[in-house]
Image (spheres, rainbow, N blue to C red):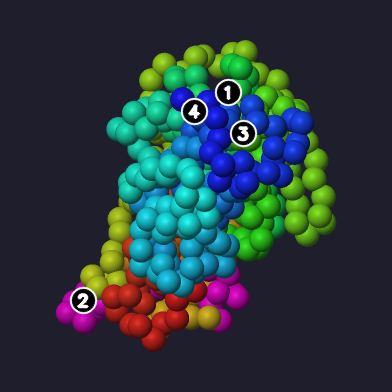
Amino acid sequence: MHEELSNSELERYARHLSLPQVGMKGQIKLKNSSVLVVGAGGLGSPCLLYLAAAGLGNIGIIDDDKVDVSNLQRQVIHSNANLGEFKVDSAKRRLLDLNPEITVRTFNSRLNIENALDLIKQFDIIVDGTDNFQTRYLINDACEILNKVWIFASIHQFEGQVSTFNSSHGLNYRDIFPKPPPLEFAPNCAEAGVLGILPGIIGSIQAAEAIKIILGMGNILSGKLLLFNALSMSSRILKFEANTSRGLISELSLESEYCMSNSSFGDITPLEYMDKINTDNWKPFLLDVRRPDEEIISKIEGTNLTIVHTEIPNRIQEIPSDRDIVIYCRSGVRSAAVQRFLIEAGHANRILNLKGGILNWSDTVDSSVRKY
């Protein structure tokens, strides 16, 4: 437990020390506090940078991904020099370069049901920088069990949301969102797209929430959901009440509904697809479920039909019933949702999802097919 600031810290945090709401006492609180940021991507980047710059003494980062060039449009903690590097390593180096006075701990793994409780209990506040519902519900449930505050955020194209949960036994994520949505209604940034500046704005708000919680100042977003729209440059706050019928969470469990939505009814890799075409004289119906603007960038030779995945229910009659169907999209997420819909709708054919989509096809079969 630190009780004072060094001379270099006094100089570094001079603008904070000038604020009556922060001052010496507040800056020492920041130095003695710890935050775990789950994800070193679009949301995690600005949040981590501003927490480090503010003098948050102990920062944890958990992520199992590597830096890809497509990340750099919004994940500003990384650079071209970090391509192919684990994000936690890239982020740690950048944070310590920004502020060598802090401690940064990294966990090169995905947050999961096996490690969530052990990791989260080591930190005061948890920040959600993820883009998937499974991890988000896991964070929520672990934080309720451990009585930890966590700061939620999500982004979609031009819109963002922020809230603070479990503050002083306040509102829980499940009070607002009791169950995960079906996968087809929950695309990640890679599938839906996102304005690069948006996670910078939303992630910075998360950092502000964390600092306010630590210092006990201002009004935090507990019991409230902040909605921000970058196109209209407007924001509003919705207020929510606790769901009194919801039982207490006492143990972690993966959401069965979400796991089902992620499950595969039958995948085929690009290499398996080509091998079957070449050796078995296989002639499947190749269905592209991407948008027209994506089709312009690249497509797989031999594609029979393109239907935007959201239009499948209205155009299901265009999909033949006398051939095997192989469905693809950019990464395999939307195509898996369409596959599940067709099977549940009673489509009689064998329906396969092209695993990894265009990205995997370009990596393993034909590099001339452009990735995006």
Amino acid type, callout 3: Gln
Q: Nearer the viewer, mark 2 or mark 1?
A: 1
Amino acid type, callout 1: Asn
Q: Measuring 81% from the left and 55% from the top, which residue is drawn there?
A: 233
| Mark positioned earlier in the residue sequence (2 or 1) | 1
Magenta span includes 348? no
Pointer 2 residue: 275
Residue furthest left as drawn: 279
In the shown orientation, is residue 223 left or right of residue 303?
right
Q: Measuring 49% from the left and 14% from the top, which residue is drawn there?
A: 248
Pointer 3 residue: 27
Q: Residue 2: which disc?
A: 4
In the shown orientation, is residue 114 left or right of residue 188?
left
The spot of residue 340 in percent (x, y) is 42, 51
Report helix, strand or loop for mark 3: helix
The spot of residue 38 in percent (x, y) is 46, 43
**Magenta region:** 274-296
Tag 1: Cα neighbours inside 10 Å, few (<14), some, or many (≥20)?
A: some
* Residue 136 showing in the rendered view: no
Q: Is residue 353 above or below residue 183?
A: below
